[in-house]
Image: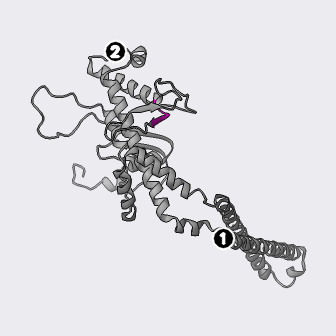
Amino acid sequence: MNQAGSDVASALIAPVTYGYALTAHAVQGSTVDRTFALGAERIYAQEGYVIASRARQETRFYLSDHQDEAGESAPGPPAPPPNAIVRFAEHLSESRRHELAIDEPARARARALATPQLQTERARVAGELADFPGTRARELEHLSQRLGRLDADRVQAEGEARAARSELDALGPLKRRGPHADELRADLRRTQIQLDYLGDQTDAATRQVAKLRAEHDPVRWIEQHADQVRDLRAIDHELAVRKHQVQRQLVRAAQSDPPEHVTAVLGDRPENYATRLQWERGVWAIEIYRHRPLTIDRNEVLGHPRIVLNTPDATRFTRQPPSQAGVCV
């Protein structure tokens, strides 16, 4: 409104469409040049992947040191707030993947076993699945891709034939006797030859697929071994969870009582809070890199694992250089 009371907004302001911000659910499937995202407290692994994979050029996460009150705290001086980057990394480590109810019995059986028993069970189940027809599966995959390409070529050739036939029908009686009509008829003959070739190739590939599935069908094999496949996935998941827990224990132990290889690189544990956060991130990077080829000893006592490295001599801790290893701090 101006001073005279007239509405001038429609004349001076261009139409505005809201939509400058989207949720991670709404942005799924889209592609943009740049993404500017808020690293909120409720973010988790799957949501972070969706956000980070939308941009062609750059993705920026904006973090805040502010943290909601967690209720009553213990007596004494207030604890310093956790670092925003550390808190953001912990949120991205949290997975909210939905599990099928049919997989839960296998997960429960895996959780009930000690780590040595779990490794023994994994070797047994993997042995039962060793006869998977992998060569036949790869051949069927290649044939399926070939059938897809043949079908795409057939659709394209049929479209070209329709276009040439339509153009030929649109010509008048005199033009149908001219050179342009002769070119169209030649195109139709070439297209028909191509369609016949594509049909023969499709029939041959289809017969080959039927023959391979009759001999060793990977789909039927998976259906017959569904329980073992489910058990193997559950065991691998449980072993990965326990390995992650062991790594966290090692990192926290090194941060609380830094060993010599840490102090030689980063120095002693600093008293200043801000400096200590950077020091702890450095300890995390060193320990994750150092224990990358990590295994769990078979003599582990449940709840108190003893960690060894992949070395012939378990009394010495030596490192094997991991291939293409890299750590981001």
Magenta span: predominant SS is loop
Left or right position of 29 against 153:
left
Q: Residues within 10 Å of mark 1 (few under 14, many from 20)?
A: some
| Residue drawn at (54%, 58%) of the image | 128
Task: Identify which residue, 253 or 175, lies in the foreground.
Answer: 253
Residue 184 rendering spot, x and y as whole percentages: 84, 74
Extreme residue in the bottom direction: 173
| Residue drawn at (35%, 54%) of the image | 18
Start-end of magenta stretch:
291-295
Q: Is residue 249 above or below residue 207?
A: above
Circle 2/circle 1 CB separation < 8 Å: no
| Residue drawn at (38%, 38%) of the image | 300
Residue 102 falls in image quadrant? bottom left
Q: Is 243 a magenta residue? A: no
Q: Which mark is residue 281?
A: none
Q: Which residue is mark 1?
A: 213
Q: Which residue is mark 2?
A: 268
Q: Is residue 40 above or below residue 18?
A: above
Query: What amino acid is found at the position of numbered circle 1 in the picture?
Result: Arg
Residue 259 rendering spot, x and y as whole percentages: 37, 19
The secondary element bearing badge 2 is classed as loop
Residue 154 rendering spot, x and y as whole percentages: 72, 71
